[in-house]
Amino acid sequence: MKDSLTIVLSGEAGQGLQTIEEFLVEALSKEYYVFTSKEVMSRVRGGNNTVEIRVSNAPIYALRYTIDYLFLLNKNSFYRLPKRLTKDTVVFGEENFVTSEDKEKYNLNLETFELTKLAKEAGNRLFANTILFGYIAGMLKLSRHIGHELIEKRFEHRGEKMVLANQEAYDMGFELGTNYHMPKTIEKPESVPSYKIIDGNTALGIGALAGGVNYIASYPMSPGTTVLMYLANKGEEFGVLAEQAEDEIAALNMVIGAWYAGARGLATTSGGGFALMTEAVSLAGITENPAVVHVAQRPGPATGLPTRTEQGDLNLVVYAGHGEFPRIVLAPGKLEDGIHLAQRAFWLADKYQVPVFILSDQFWLESMGQMEPFEVDDRYLESFVVKTEKDYKRYDWTNTISPRGIPGYGEGFVKADSDEHDESGQITEDFDVRVKMHEKRLAKRELLLEDYQQAELVGPADYKQLVVGWGSTYGVLKEYIETTDQKDVAYLYVKQPFPLPLSMKSYFDQAENVVVVESNATGQFTNILKLELDVKVDHRILKYNGEPFNIEEINERVSEVLR
């Protein structure tokens, strides 16, 4: 495990945890490496939410389970956290935030921190979060001026008086934090590159814009709604039309219609919403109409745990829709891949005229980390739309990928229908035409595999043992490989879990022991490896309680099954 500190803030919905997180991440990223994520109850107000901020002197992309410094913000903020405490954990909070029974039972190292009183002294209870920001910045010996700059940026629209008042509250906390002697510290790195601070939702939004999205239709469903909000806010600047549909069925049909008319459309949803879209997925299949759908996974069945995380919808997107037709599933696991893969999704959908799914989960979407700036590749803006002639045949079977025209561009008539059809798009019940048209669609699979998004190998090329993961397990597995003493183990990060090319089997042929790590109960990707490549997996490491994998449990569970 990398040298790091774990700071957890525990309060309730509406108490401003997200604001503190954003301030701290921006400030910390100037002088440390940082990674944060949230644990949120399904409440608009109240309940108990936490923010974990992990600080290190080396790049990190995952969470620790154990807490070094815990800040309690109300009386209901302790009860879910005792399992994560150690004998060295320092708990900060007001005296009555923890019962005397809990103090004795857990032998708490409690540091009295009268945040409400301090806020009143600063002039307003609303300054509590600013004081806490200053206190933690002081503890970690951050440069004071960084906090001042961030506060000015955040509050300048509210006038100089508000800026100065918040800066004074920050200074009050900063002085107190500077004077606190931390029992556990880490050395500051000599320097930290100038990283971009970003979360998964924002990465997907940027990637969609870079892929040419100009239409989004969705029905709000957490945790995918933020992508809709992000693109709606970029509407004027980038020419994106955002539509809040009446339901998920309408949303995907609108997206299919947008592509038919020449736009690049996106629908974002979660598993329960996507379940309603499956008939429209089949419509895209038979009409050979491009579509891009982002599915933000959370634990099911039904509403399940609507604000927690799981990788339980891989089977859903792989097999969604009645009938047989090709599709592509992409699953980013690091922030830059959120941009790359979202951008690529639109290009693949346009090129191969198939539905493309971007599969993420709550943990990846709502975690914040550092990313090196890079230039996006303009080649993914390439359009495959053709200008039609008078005798245009939408489903011309001379080529597996028929030329795709759009209404009004050229002289041809662009027919599309949900029934089986001939080359021109005319409905048919001819059995021979059915077979020929069906085989033409299915033959795309081999062609689209030519553009397979290659997996990434982390660790030694001469490995004997292979740990495999897809999507959000990237960070925790990468850290395991970077810190383990075992030298014959590597990690295969799969960015496109479906379909898989036969060439990928070479990774597994080299390994004497294959371990697949997934956040679901049945090993969905493990089963796809068997079906697609006939790969024998020796061990499955699964988790499905709604929490992401953490460093400690990966160290323990992977080490148990390595030879």
Image (cartoon, rainbow, N blue to C red):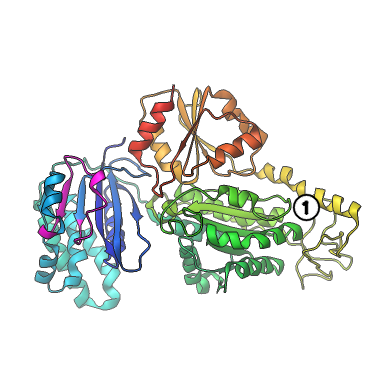
Residue 80 in the magenta stretch? The answer is yes
Classify 10 Å Cα crowding around label 1: few (below 14), some (14-19), many (20 and above).
Answer: some
Q: Relative to the observer, which residue lies in front, 509 or 386?
A: 509
Apparent side of residue 44 relative to residue 441 in the rendered image (left or right): left
Compared to residue 232, the image places residue 67 above or below, namely: above
Task: Give the farthest residue toward the front.
Answer: 101
- Percent x, y for residue 522? 52, 41
Label 1 sits on a secondary structure element that is loop
Work out which quarter of the rendered image holds the C terminus and state it: top left
* x 84%, y 69%: residue: 412
* Amino acid residing under circle 1: Ile
Work out which quarter of the rendered image holds the N terminus and state it: top left
* x 34%, y 47%: residue: 193
Residue 149 in the magenta stretch? The answer is no
Q: Quadrant of residue 145?
A: bottom left
Magenta span main SS: loop
The span shown in magenta is 72-96
- Percent x, y for residue 45? 31, 68
Residue under pointer 1: 401
- Percent x, y for residue 400? 80, 50
- Percent x, y for residue 531? 65, 37
